[in-house]
Each structure stands twice: as C-alpha cells, then as structure tokens.
Image (cartoon, rainbow, N blue to C red):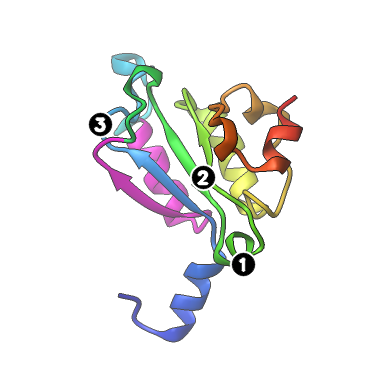
Amino acid sequence: MPDTPTESARDASLPGLTACSLCAGETLGQGDPEPGGQMARLRAMAERGAARLTLVECLDECERGDVVVARPSGVCRRAGAGPVWFERLAGDRGTAALERWLRAGGPGARPLPPELAEHLIDRGADAPADVAASAH
C-alpha cells in the first residue's frame, strides 16, 4: 500500500510492466553480459520510474521466452487502452526501446515504436486497435 496519496497518484499515472520471473532473460541465457541479467534491467527500469513492475510466475507463453506485458496507465486504461504483449525483448537494445516508450506514456498514450513492433505478440481480438494498426 502506498505511503501517501501523492505516491498513489504518481503510481496510477505510470504505465505498468508485467514480466514472467521464470523466463526473464531466457533467450540470452548465460551469454547475458549484465550482472543479474534481464531481471536486473527490468528492476532498474522500474527504479528509474519508467513503469510499475509486477513479477509473475508464468504468463502462459513459455515457448516465446522473455515475455513482458506493457500495461496502460490508469488514465489510458479508462480511455480504452489495453495491454501490449512482447516476446524476446531481453538485452540492452530491446529493453531500452521499451523503456523509452513507457516513459513517453506507453500503451494508449503513444503509438508503438517500430523497433518494438517486431517483438509484438499478436493477441488477436485482445490487441488494442492503435497497436494493431501501428504494427502493420
């Protein structure tokens, strides 16, 4: 529970990021040069205030490796934005692109950048219209 109403309001204005704690960094494996690997990158992104990080045991997309879900801020969610699922974003380049997008507002606030489109998981009818359109 947040310490103050101000902290709660700040958290609600941030997009969220859900990561599978079991597969984070899976595609880089032992070759990841970052101490702590992909999990360290995701935690550092959250500590820098780019997103609220939630770790789960499984997102039921195990064959994809390194699955993360960008969740819209409360304002964008109320305006109809939905979550955006990504695969194989492990590493400095993909994580940096994700962080830039989340800092700019993420789902519902900004179009999906081209460098993230190649990692998009097509969720079919669950995909928000603005993301589906920008991925093609």
Q: Residue at x 53, y 54 (%)?
A: 50
Q: Position of residue 126 (x, y in %)?
A: 55, 39
Q: Give the side of residue 103 with respect to residue 7, left or right.
A: right
Amino acid type shown at disc 1: Val
Q: Quadrant of the C terminus?
A: top right
Q: Position of residue 44 (x, y in %)?
A: 41, 47
Residue on which disc 3 sits: 22
- Who is closer to the viewer here, 88 or 42? 88
Q: Give the side of residue 42 with respect to residue 1, left or right.
A: right
| Label 2 vs 1, first from the N-terminus | 2
Mark 2 and mark 3: span between their CA atoms? 17 Å
Q: Quadrant of the N terminus?
A: bottom left
| Label 1 vs 3, first from the N-terminus | 3
Mark 2–mark 1 CB contact (< 8 Å)? no
Residue on which disc 2 sits: 70
Mark 1 and mark 3: span between their CA atoms? 30 Å
Label 2 SS:
strand
Q: Is residue 120 magenta?
A: no
Label 3 SS:
loop
Q: Is residue 46 magenta?
A: yes
CA neighbours of label 3 inside 10 A, class few (<14), some (14 to 19), many (20+): some
Q: Give the side of residue 37 with respect to residue 125, left or right.
A: left
Q: Residue at x 52, y 72 (%)?
A: 10
Mark 2 and mark 1: span between their CA atoms? 14 Å
CA neighbours of label 1 inside 10 A, class few (<14), some (14 to 19), many (20+): some
Which of the 4 quarters of the picture holds residue 25? top left
Residue 75 tag number: 1
Residues shaded magenta: 38-58
